[in-house]
């Protein structure tokens, strides 16, 4: 046995045209013991959202050009990575003794480890390397968390990500109020950043309409017509202020 068929591409008239996709048998062997013991597969979970290490990201975060690894775009506040101290903007360059040469490599390497296994993770943060010892979680638990309603909402228009306020985020950002949505990620080149919005800010209202969760935030943004400015009520620490985001200029 050299592989196990996972999919076969049929022809337009049906039947097999000789093109198939298979799981290498060496990969299948790795899960045989799990299948025999529990009829399921247990994989490690780190609790990060990653993306390709682009030159623009390296420049924005003060990372040495040419650094290879997986750029940490976001961190689950209750995941193993967050508890160990890994932050958005870090670049994971080594995991469990293996060099991470690209972001697509990291999920496979993490999944090859078992839940509750302790591994060393090396990250590049600005110009320094940091090593963390992390006890992995269970991937199935992480997937269930990702399906919960308390999710994150991306706004490509503004260049930010907001999240429902939880006790953990209140503590992390030292929030003085729990009404609104908290900015957990900001594009440093986005329009929101240019007008002074930062991570940890709480958006309390859009177009003078209060927003209590990410669903309401998204709904209010969708009501703003093209060519109109966006009026936001933003709390920074103990003080709230109005911020007006002008309409995007038409490209011509």
Image: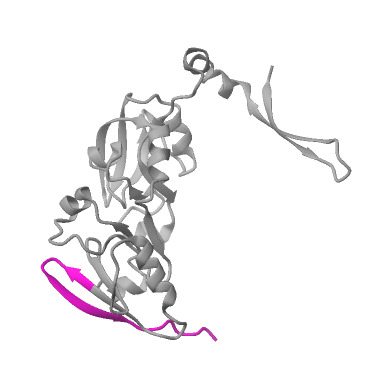
* Left or right, residue 31 beside residue 212: right
Residue 239 is one of the magenta-drawn residues: yes
* Left or right, residue 198 beside residue 136: left
Q: Residue at x 38, y 50 (%)?
A: 149
Q: Residue at x 42, y 58 (%)?
A: 55
Residue 69 is one of the magenta-drawn residues: no
Q: In the rendered view, tell whether residue 165 sits above or below residue 208.
A: above
Q: Farthest residue in the left direction? A: 238
Percent position of residue 9, x then y: 77, 39
- Nearer to us in this view, 100 or 40: 40
Percent position of residue 192, x then y: 32, 72
Name the image colouring. one colour
Q: Residue at x 22, y 61 (%)?
A: 200
Percent position of residue 41, x then y: 48, 24
Instruction: Look at the image and give the residue range highlighted in magenta.
Output: 234-252
Percent position of residue 225, x then y: 45, 82
Toward which corner of the image does residue 213 lie, by quadrant? bottom left
Q: In the rendered view, tell whether residue 109 sits above or below residue 206.
A: above
- Nearer to us in this view, 130 or 41: 41
Please identify the quadrant where the N terminus is shown: top right
Toward which corner of the image does residue 177 lie, by quadrant? bottom left
**Label total for image:** 0
């Amino acid at each position: 046995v050299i592989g196990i068929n996972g999919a076969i591409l049929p022809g337009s008239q049906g039947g097999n045209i000789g093109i198939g996709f298979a799981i290498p048998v060496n990969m299948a062997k790795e899960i045989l013991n799990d299948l025999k013991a529990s009829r399921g597969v247990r994989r490690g979970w780190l609790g990060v959202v990653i993306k390709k290490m682009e030159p623009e990201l390296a420049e924005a975060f003060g990372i040495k050009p040419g650094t290879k690894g997986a750029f940490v775009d976001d961190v689950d506040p209750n995941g193993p990575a967050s508890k160990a101290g890994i932050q958005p903007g870090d670049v994971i360059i080594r995991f469990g003794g293996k060099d991470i040469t690209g972001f697509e490599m990291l999920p496979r390497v993490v999944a090859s480890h078992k839940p509750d296994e302790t591994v060393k993770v090396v990250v590049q943060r600005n110009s320094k390397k940091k090593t963390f010892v992390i006890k992995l979680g269970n991937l199935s638990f992480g997937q269930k968390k990702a399906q919960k309603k308390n999710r994150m909402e991306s706004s490509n228009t503004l260049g930010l990500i907001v999240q429902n306020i939880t006790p953990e985020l209140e503590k992390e950002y030292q929030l003085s109020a729990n009404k609104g949505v908290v900015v957990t990620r900001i594009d440093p080149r986005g329009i929101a950043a240019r007008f002074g919005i930062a991570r940890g800010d709480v958006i309390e209202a859009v177009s003078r309409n209060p927003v209590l969760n990410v669903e309401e935030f998204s709904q209010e943004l969708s009501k703003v017509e093209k060519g109109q400015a966006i009026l936001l009520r933003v709390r920074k620490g103990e003080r709230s202020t109005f911020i007006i985001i002008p309409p995007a200029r038409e490209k011509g």
